[in-house]
Amino acid sequence: MIKIVNVEIYSQVYDVTPFMDDHPGGDEVLLAATGKDATNDFEDTGHSDDARDMMHKYYIGEIDKATVPLRRPYTPPKEVYNPDKTQEFIIKILQFLVPLLILGLAFGVRQYTKEKSG
């Protein structure tokens, strides 16, 4: 089953379905460019003049910018501010002190048993 693959470059739409097998970069490149403005991808690749001349064969129309929804700016999720960070601080201190306390206790027991036997 062959899907119709349309690519938008400079607000112009191209049906590149017949070119899928012949594209030097492979059909994956064309499939990745569908559904978005592929102008930057097209220019970043550095296509030859022959490739640009070939585009007119696949031209099917223009994008009506009035029908394209505006992009909303990205707003990162709001972090919940915790004014009372005392609990977090205590947990971090305990994560540091408890292993030291265990190590000190083990060292003390070892020294104590060494003195008793020697």
Image: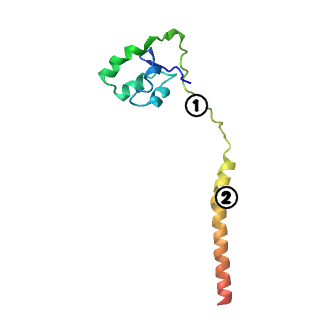
Picture coordinates of residue 86 (x, y %)? 68, 48
User: Callout 1 environment at 10 Å: few (<14), some (14 to 19), or many (20+)?
Assistant: few
Amino acid type shown at disc 2: Leu
Picture coordinates of residue 67 (x, y %)? 54, 10
Residue on which the image places disc 1: 76
Taking the image as shown, residue 114 lies to the left or right of residue 63, namely: right
Taking the image as shown, residue 29 lies to the left or right of residue 112, namely: left
Quadrant for the C terminus, please.
bottom right
The CA span between labels 2 and 1 is 32 Å
Q: Nearer the viewer, residue 53 or 37?
A: 53
Badge 2 vs badge 1, beta-carbon distance below 8 Å: no
Taking the image as shown, residue 109 lies to the left or right of residue 7, namely: right
Q: Nearer the viewer, residue 86 or 102?
A: 102
Residue on which the image places disc 2: 94
Quadrant for the N terminus, please.
top right
Tell me if residue 112 comes above or below residue 70 in the rendering. below
- The residue depicted at 54 percent of the width and 16 percent of the height is 70
Residue farthest toward the bottom in the current orientation of the protein: 118
Amino acid type shown at disc 1: Pro
Q: Nearer the viewer, mark 2 or mark 1?
A: 1
- Secondary structure, mark 1, is loop
